């Protein structure tokens, strides 16, 4: 069944957990879709795990459109949510609507995601009024990593926790259909989840959220530059890949690959007639 903002809302009402993973290409998206994932996030995390940047700030609209369209071609039932990159929505409401529209039209997104609380609510309201579903993102917001002073758990003081709760309510009021909570204390995430009518998607926010999201390279052990505390490795695919690459190199150098079964034949008399 096709996952939509309606099925997201129904999942929260019925107490069914929402599954979400990142993907950035057709083949991976197709595998996730066939496994039954509810949603695929084309995250600006592609800056780290695909493009090799130290942060997400250098990711462009063209990057997100390119990878979003690839994922959308592989996802038949999963909702495809595409991140709005840094400075694609912060500058003005107009820019936010135009760029969200590009992600839908050119990037084939089902919805867009942007970071921030009350300060981006005018953008959220305008984008949703343009007929584009918006997912919010609170807590550790990677696009604000310099302002936050690094990768730190958010909402640990009373003032910070209250602001996060107020921001979540404001995003819901502005029209967001869901909100990601990243690096938030478990009890605070539970409080936010109970307060909101829209689903919460946790990443480092405990099991009390309505769903979970992880970067797929993290959960498969394919990215080792930095591993957050909240990541569980469900498989060590990275090691399997390295072993396969090494075996390929060895067999090629030894001459055992390609073998006869991997080659195409031609009649000997044709070869003999060549000059």
Image (cartoon, rainbow, N blue to C red):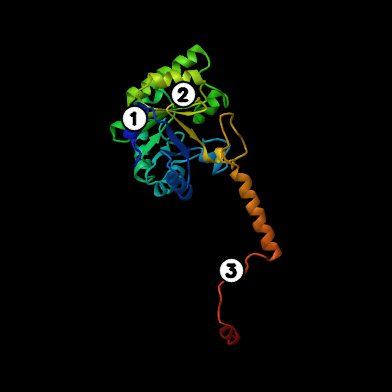
Q: Is mark 3 on a helix, strand or loop?
A: helix
Q: Give the label on residue 261, or none.
A: 3
Answer whether labels 3 and 2 touch (C-beta < 8 Å): no
Q: Mark 2 points at which residue?
A: 208
Q: Where is residue 148 in the image (x, y as percent from the top left)?
A: 54, 23
Position of the N terminus, as image quadrant, is top left
Quick one: 29 or 49, which is closer to the camera? 29
Residue depicted at 37% across the width and 44% down the height: 77
Marked residue nearer the N-terminal end (3 or 2): 2
Image-quadrant location for residue 128: top left
For label 1, the crowd category at 10 Å Cα-Cα, with few meaning under 14, some 14 to 19 and many 20 or more, is some
Position of the C terminus, as image quadrant, is bottom right
Q: What element carries label 1?
A: helix
Q: In this view, does 154 lie to the left or right of 200?
A: right
Estimate the spatial distance between the alpha carbons at disc 3 and disc 2, rounded to whole Å. Answer: 53 Å
Q: Mark 1 points at which residue?
A: 9
Q: Position of residue 197 (x, y in %)?
A: 35, 23
């Amino acid at each position: 069944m096709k996952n939509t903002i309606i099925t997201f809302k129904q999942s929260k009402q019925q107490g069914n957990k929402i599954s979400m993973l990142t993907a950035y290409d057709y083949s991976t998206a197709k595998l996730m879709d066939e496994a039954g994932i509810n949603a695929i996030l084309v995250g600006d995390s592609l800056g780290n795990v695909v493009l090799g940047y130290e942060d997400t700030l250098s990711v462009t609209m063209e990057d997100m459109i390119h990878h979003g369209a690839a994922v959308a071609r592989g996802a038949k039932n999963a909702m495809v949510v595409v991140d709005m990159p840094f400075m694609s929505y912060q500058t003005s409401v107009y820019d936010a609507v135009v760029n969200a529209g590009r992600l839908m039209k050119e990037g084939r997104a089902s919805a867009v995601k942007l970071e921030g609380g009350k300060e981006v609510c005018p953008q959220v309201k305008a984008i949703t009024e343009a007929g584009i579903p918006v997912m919010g993102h609170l807590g550790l917001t990677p696009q604000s990593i310099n302002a936050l002073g690094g990768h730190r758990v958010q909402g640990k003081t009373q003032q910070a926790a209250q602001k996060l709760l107020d921001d979540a309510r404001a995003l819901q009021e502005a029209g967001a259909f869901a909100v990601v909570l990243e690096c938030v204390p478990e009890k605070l995430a539970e409080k936010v989840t109970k307060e909101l009518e829209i689903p919460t998607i946790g990443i480092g926010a405990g099991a009390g959220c309505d769903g979970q999201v992880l970067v797929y390279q993290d959960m498969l052990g394919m990215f080792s530059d930095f591993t957050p505390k909240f990541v569980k490795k469900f498989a060590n695919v990275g090691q399997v890949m390295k072993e396969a690459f090494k075996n390929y190199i060895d067999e090629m150098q030894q001459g055992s690959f390609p073998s006869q079964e991997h080659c195409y034949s031609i009649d000997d008399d044709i070869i003999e007639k060549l000059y």
